[in-house]
Each structure stands twice: as C-alpha cells, then as structure tokens.
Image: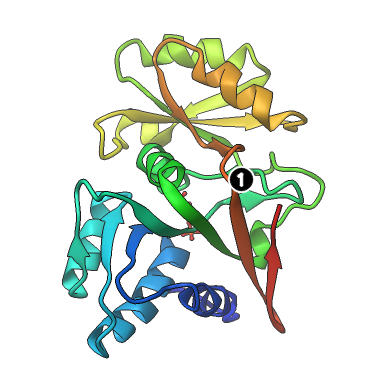
Amino acid sequence: MPDPNGEKSAAASEALKLVKNGMVLGLGTGTTFEVFLDLLSEKVKQGLKISGVPSSERTAVRARERGITILAEPREIDLTVDGADEFDDHLFLIKGGGGALMREKVVAANSRHVCIIVDSSKYNGSGIGRFPVPVEISKFLSRHTMKKIEKLGCRCTLRDDGRFLTDNGNQIADCKFDSVPDPVRLESQIKSIPGVLEVGLFTSINWEVIMGTKSGVKTFRK
Ligand code: 5RP
C-alpha cells in the first residue's frame, strides 16, 4: 500500500490498539484502511478472534483473502475503522473518494465506536471543502439530479463520465464547492434532492480521528 512517509501506518497501528478479542469490526474502504487491514490480519494469524462487516465489495474480498470472517447481519458492530478524504477541527468529514460512502455511512451509524484513520494531508483546519463532495445518485435522470445539486453552489462532475458505478449500482457526482461553511445543513440539503441516495459529508456521528504525523500520531476527539 503506498505510504511514503509512514503516516498511514502510524495511524493504523494506533487504531489497532482499540481492537479486542471477540469484537465485531466495521471494515472501511481505501488505502489507509487497507494498511490497517494488513496489520489486523497479522494479529488474526497470531490468534486474535474478530469478525467484520465490510463497507465495500473491495474490502470484503481483501478481508476474506486475509482469513477474516465476514458477517452480513451482525447483532452489533463494536468498532469501525475507516479512512477519510478530508477533515477539520469540528471533525466534519468528506468521504467517498473510493465510492463506498453509502455503506460506509450505514456501517459507521450502526457502530458503538468509530475510529477514522488518516495521514496529515487529509487535515484542513480552516474547514472541509477542498475535496469535492462525492454524492451517490441514481442513474435515472442523473444529469437532472446534478443540476439540482449545482443550484446549491457547486460544480458537479459525473465520476468517470458515468461509467463508475458503486457497489449499489449507482453513479457518483463529485461536487466541488468553493467552501462548505455549514456542512450539517449542506448534508441535509443535498440528501433531500430526489435521486440522491447518499452524501459524502459525514457530520453527525461521534468518531475520533487518528492522524499520522511525521513524529507519530495526533488524536482528535469531539
Ligand atoms: C472510500 C473512502 C475512503 O475512506 C477515502 O476515500 C480515503 O481513502 P484513502 O485512505 O485511500 O485516501 O471514503 O469511499
């Protein structure tokens, strides 16, 4: 996994300390999460007993390859570990760079504890909005849906010209705003547009963010 300065590994190692024997884990998606998955699978080889609920088909394949038991309907998810594309001091997140935002949000919303792991390039102290907000939309009249989203003040691009499809069979509109002063409001405004299935703004779940740095890790909590 590309991790030129070791920051992803530092964050992943710190998150691994939260994993206890017998836990059901929510399994995120993306390169940072996959660094964590590699470390987790070493522990599994050494005897750690955990099972997982994957947030994407990509993660499900990789987890199975590493001997992790996959559950479809767990009674409870103890801990979810996932990455993010951008975060700020309010711990508002933009997620969905890998297109898994819908399942990622469902998994996180149903977890007792959520830990987001990132390298320092993902931190934007002045407020999220640098990264385009991924929005999962139905293929049906998708360009019309995008026009409605653009009325909220952004430019939308259909990912891979509409060829990119999520695990749910939908498209992704990447929506670039100049700034996102009120992510909570914007999340609900976008979500209320017909044709929108999910928004890559994560504002209301209680998580901690572990950021890898040149000298170790920094943990952000609400
Ligand atoms: C996938 C995601 C990822 O967590 C996010 O894109 C970060 O990925 P990476 O760790 O590869 O930078 O939200 O939908």
Residue 33 position in % (x across, y down): 43, 64
Residue 37 position in % (x across, y down): 36, 72
Position of the N terminus by quadrant: bottom left
Q: Is residue 52 above or below residue 74?
A: below
Amino acid type of the residue that numbered disc 1 sits on in the rendered structure:
Leu
Task: Answer yes or no: disc 1 within 8 Å of ligand 1.
Answer: no
Residue 48 position in % (x across, y down): 29, 82
Seen from the viewer's position, the closer of residues 58 and 112 is 112
Which quadrant holds residue 35? bottom left
Q: Residue at x 50, y 56 (%)?
A: 113
Looking at this view, name the residue that lies furthest to the right: 126
Which quadrant holds residue 169? top left
Q: Residue at x 30, y 20 (%)?
A: 139
Tell me, yes or no, if residue 29 can be seen here: no
Count of labels in the image: 1
Q: Residue at x 66, y 50 (%)?
A: 87
Task: Assign a secondary structure to mark 1.
Answer: strand
Q: Is residue 214 above or below residue 139?
A: below
Seen from the viewer's position, the closer of residues 158 and 43 is 43
Q: Residue at x 33, y 20 (%)?
A: 138
Residue wearing tag 1: 93
